[in-house]
Amino acid sequence: MRKIDIFDTTLRDGEQSAGVNLNALEKLEIAKQLERLGVDIMEAGFPASSKGDFQAVKTIAETVKDSSVTGLARANKKDIDAAWDALKNSAEPRLHVFLATSPIHMTYKLKKTPDEVLESAVEAVKYAKQKFSIVQWSAEDATRSDKWFLVKIITEVIKAGASVINIPDTVGYRSPEEYGGIFAFLRENVPNIDKVKLSAHCHDDLGMAAANSLAAIEHGATQVEGAINGIGERAGNTALEEVAVALHIRNDHYQAQTRLKLNEIKKTSQLISKLTGMVVPGNKAVVGENAFAHESGIHQDGVLKEASTYEIITPELIGLSSNRLVLGKHSGRHAVKNKIEDLGFNLSEDKINEVFEAFKALTDKKKEVTDDDLFDILTEKQTETKDVEKYELKSVQLQYGTNNIQTATVAVTAPDGSYKEEAATGAGSVEAIYNTIERIVEQPLELVDYQIKSIGGGRDALAEVYVKAVYNGVESGGRGSAQDVLEASAKAYLNAVNRAVVNGSRTKQKVNL
Ligand code: KIV
Ligand code: ZN
């Protein structure tokens, strides 16, 4: 059985998804869950791109012990030095350095000749190797590169010290047969290829990322890169959960396995969806809401007689809980603490007290508190940044009538600590609230996207709202949950404003790939 290393880039390529801006605590929380999931390597960010990313990579590198932590760098000393400063205290300092090799990228983006690219790649790997014990080199846009140029440059970077070679299908262009063929070709023609691990990195522009990654495995790749829920640039990266479950279910065919704890998949998917605001489509393979739902009578009948008639994956395999209703008004701190641990969170006593208070407040409004409700409270408490001055919602009031113009009154505390209250009208209740908030924050604020979903079922379920908004020229995501949809909407909009303030300073320093 071949062992396939899982290289997770949710926090780097995944975070490059449009509108996703994770703060340092959110990144750390995701990193800890990826460690529990058992990823071999996690790419925590791109340290040279911003101070925020640098700090997040450093914190993760110093916290995570059971996965190897890496960071991205372009092929220059400044990026490599920044990555070293962020990663030097990790258990196994590992660098991911890349340079484009396709004629399109070399001519138009890098404005370099192939010889100059080869020289820069070799120089960067040699420099990195003086610091890092493991250096991975990626040929960006490898799949649109000249194959013989790939052979030449890969041969040289291996001589320079690279021990992992990544072949990205950067623009999601190749078919599985073609992509697998590139791995077969390189294995046949790069003389020193047996000295390195080959890695697959696919994007989903043509919906073939998972199939391409599996084809690469069939042709010799022993590392697969991707993101949970398939998030990432444009159409996203390979969904790692799909590859891992495919290798498990079709073990007879692939004869390969990963060390992922598959029963941590659902929890990881939920956490990432919640913190990034990227809702998982209901029909998404493995982690979608409907992945185990049998709707037609014939299918239901078959499953009741024998589950394997229509079910190749069991919900238990990915750790899908049946959302048992266990906690309520009379549950004590001890029961809540046990549940917190069951859900995989490791909190200080102070944090447990905070969560318990929020839990108690919820039981005043809601009879039964589900795992999902508690999960919501936990992620909010674990990831709220206390050191950032922000707008905080104090109250929302609404005058609503089917034949009236809706009027909202919103009160907040502002970043300077002052209390502010405003009122405004709108054609709908949410619009009235958002017009009021725009008055409060005194800067142009535009709503780009608004989504709402319920956490669990039942009439008293919590509402969770995700928005994308542009505040003062900076686009940012925001989320908010509450039992009332309008309160959740107000919280989400203010959250987007707060994040835009943080992201605004971050964006100014951000370096494009
Ligand atoms: O898709 C890509 O080519 C990348 C590189 C930075 C490895 O993400
Ligand atoms: Zn990529």
Image (cartoon, rainbow, N blue to C red):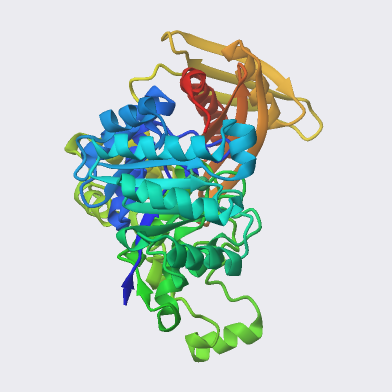
- Looking at the rendering, which quadrant does residue 102 occupy? top right
Q: Is residue 357 visible?
A: no
Q: Residue at x 38, y 72 (%)?
A: 317
Residue 115 place in picture, x, y as percent: 51, 38
Quadrant (top left/top right/bottom left/bottom right) for the N terminus = bottom left
Q: Is residue 80 above or below residue 261?
A: above
Q: Is residue 102 above or below residue 354?
A: below
Q: Residue at x 53, y 63 (%)?
A: 182
Q: Is residue 140 visible?
A: yes
Q: Residue at x 70, y 28 (%)?
A: 431
Query: In the image, is 114 to the left or to the right of 439?
Result: left
- Residue 387 or residue 81, whichever sits in front: 81
Residue 44 place in picture, x, y as percent: 36, 40
Residue 203 place in picture, x, y as percent: 56, 53
The residue most toward the bottom is: 305
Query: In the image, is 268 to the left or to the right of 341?
Result: right
Residue 356 place in picture, x, y as percent: 28, 41
Q: Is residue 149 above or below residue 29?
A: below
- Residue 167 or residue 193, whichever sits in front: 193
- Looking at the rendering, which quadrant does residue 78 occupy? top left
Q: Residue at x 56, y 89 (%)?
A: 302
- Residue 154 or residue 52, whichever sits in front: 154
